[in-house]
Amino acid sequence: MLFSSLEFLYLFLPLSLLLYFLSPKACRNAVLLVVSLLFYAFGEPIYLFLMLFTIVSDYLFGHLIARSDNPKRWLVFAVILNLTLLGFFKYYDFLASALSLPTLGLALPIGISFYTFQALSYVIDVYRREVSAQKSLVAFGTYVTLFPQLIAGPIVRYCDVDQQLKERSYPPSRVARGIAAFSAGLAKKVLFANPAGELAEGLLGGEITLLGGWLYLVLYAFQIYFDFSGYSDMAVGLGRVLGFDFPENFRYPYVSRSITDFWRRWHITLSSWFREYVYIPLGGNRRGRWRTYRNLLITWALTGIWHGAAWNFLLWGLYFFFLLAMEKAFLGKVLERVPRALRHLYSLFFILLGWMIFSSDSVSLSEGLARAAALFGVGCDGLVGGAGYELIRSLPLLALMAVGATPLPKRVYLWLIQKYPRGGRYVRNALCVAAWLLCTAYLVDSGYNPFLYFRF
C-alpha cells in the first residue's frame, strides 16, 4: 500500500490513527504492531511469516547475546541467519541465472532490505552493549514493523527509538510539525516525482538523441529524489505524529559540491548504517591508505548490491567508490581551489552519469551502452529531435523542481514563521490543506503512481 494512494490517505491512515490514539498508552505498542502487520499484509500477505520469523528470532538472539558468556557466537549466528534470508530471497535467482542453475521465480518481499538492516542493528548494538536487550517482544516487534518506515526507510537504528518505545509524548506542536512534514512529502511524491516519471518514461523507446538522453537523466534524477525523499518526509512526519523521532534521510543532495558531499546528503541512514556496521568494523581509515581503499571498495560494492540483484547496481556502487577514492586521494584538494559553481557542475555531471547506470537494470547491455554513448553525441539519432518539444513542455515543472530541490523554500517558510508567528501558522495550515487537495485531485485523475524504492 503506497502512502500516496487514496486508500491509505483516506481509509487506512485515519482508521489507524483513530485506533491508536483511542487506545490506552500501555496498549499503543501492541496496536501499532497489529496495524503495521496489517499494513504489510496488504501488499505481501504471503511473506508476513518471514517478517514474524525475523522478529522472533532476533528478539531471542538479543537475549542470548546479552546473557551468554560467549556473545560473539550468537551474534555470528544472528548475522548469518539474517543475511541468508535476505540473500536467498533477493539474490538467489540472480546468482542462479548467472551460474545457469534453475531459478525459483520468487517475488521479492517488500522492504526486506530495510527491516533486515534494522533487525541487524539491534543485535549488533546489544552485542556492543550500546543498548539493553528489549524485554518486550511486542515492543521489539513494533520497532521492526513500524509502518511509517517499514518498506522504504529511513533505516532506524534501535538505539534511536529505544526510549521512545517505552514512553512517547504527543504535544500539539509536534503533531502539527508531523502533519506538515507528511504533507510536504506527499506533495513531493505526487506533484513532482510522478509527473517527472511520466515525462521520463515518454522519452524511452523512441529515437535516441543527445538532448533526449540528458533530459531523461535530469527528469529521472528529479523523479528518484522527490519520490524517495518525499516518502522519507512522509515517514518522518508520521513518526512525529505517533511520538517517534526518525532520523533525517535527505539533506538537499543536488546542491552538493563534491561526490563526498553528495553521499553525506543522499540516503543518509543507509550511508550511516554501512559506515557504522561495515566500514568502521573493517578498520575504516585507521590502518593505512591501501586498507582504507580496500574498506571503501568492500563498503561500496555492498552498497551497490544492497540496491538490487542486477549487475548495474554493483557497477553503480563501484562507480561511486572510484569517484570517492579519487576525491580522497587528490581530487578533493583540487576541488577546494575551484569556484563553487564549477564544483557544483562537476558534482551534478557525475551524479547524473550515476543515475544512468542505476536506471539501467531493465535494459540490455547493448541498449545501455547506446544510451551512454548518446550522452556524448556518439551513435545518436540526432541532437534534438522530439526531445526539444518535451523540454519546452516540461520547463515549468523543471523550474519548480529545481527550486524545490534546494533549501530556498524551507528558508522562506521558516522566515515567515519567525517573522509572523500567527500568520506563519496559518500559512502552514493553508499549505497543508492545499497539498492534500491538489494531491487528491491528481490521484483521482491519474493512474501513474509508482514508487521506485519498493523494489529494494
Image (cartoon, rainbow, N blue to C red):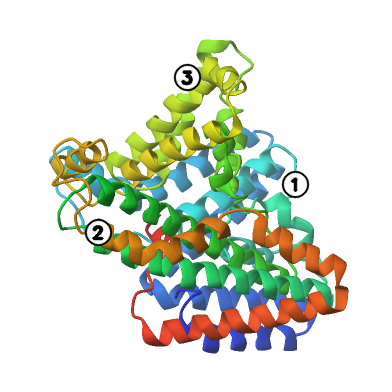
Locate residue 57, reporting x and y percent.
54, 55
Q: Mark 3 or mark 2, which is nearer the start of the sequence? A: 2
* Marks 2 and 1, the one that precedes in the sequence: 1
Q: Earlier in the sequence, mark 3 or mark 1?
A: 1
Confirm or deny contact between disc 2 and disc 3 (CB under 8 A): no
**Residue 401 image position (x, y, % from top left):** 50, 60
Local secondary structure at mark 3? helix
**Residue 246, image x and y in percent?**
68, 59
Give the residue drawn at x 59%, y 28%: 339
Q: Nearer the viewer, residue 19 or 428?
A: 428
Query: Dot 3, crowdedness within 10 Å: few (<14), some or many (≥20)?
Result: some
Residue labelled with disc 1? 131
In this view, the mark in front (2 or 3): 2
Tell me the residue that label 2 is attached to.
203
Identify the image quadrant of the C terminus: bottom left
Q: Is residue 238 left or right of residue 262?
A: right
Residue 423 horizontal side relative to residue 291, left or right: right
Does the rendering let one see residue 245?
no
Q: Amino acid at mark 2?
A: Leu
Front-lying residue, 35 or 65 = 35
Say which quadrant the N terminus sits in: bottom left
How far is disc 2 from disc 3 in space, using C-alphas? 39 Å
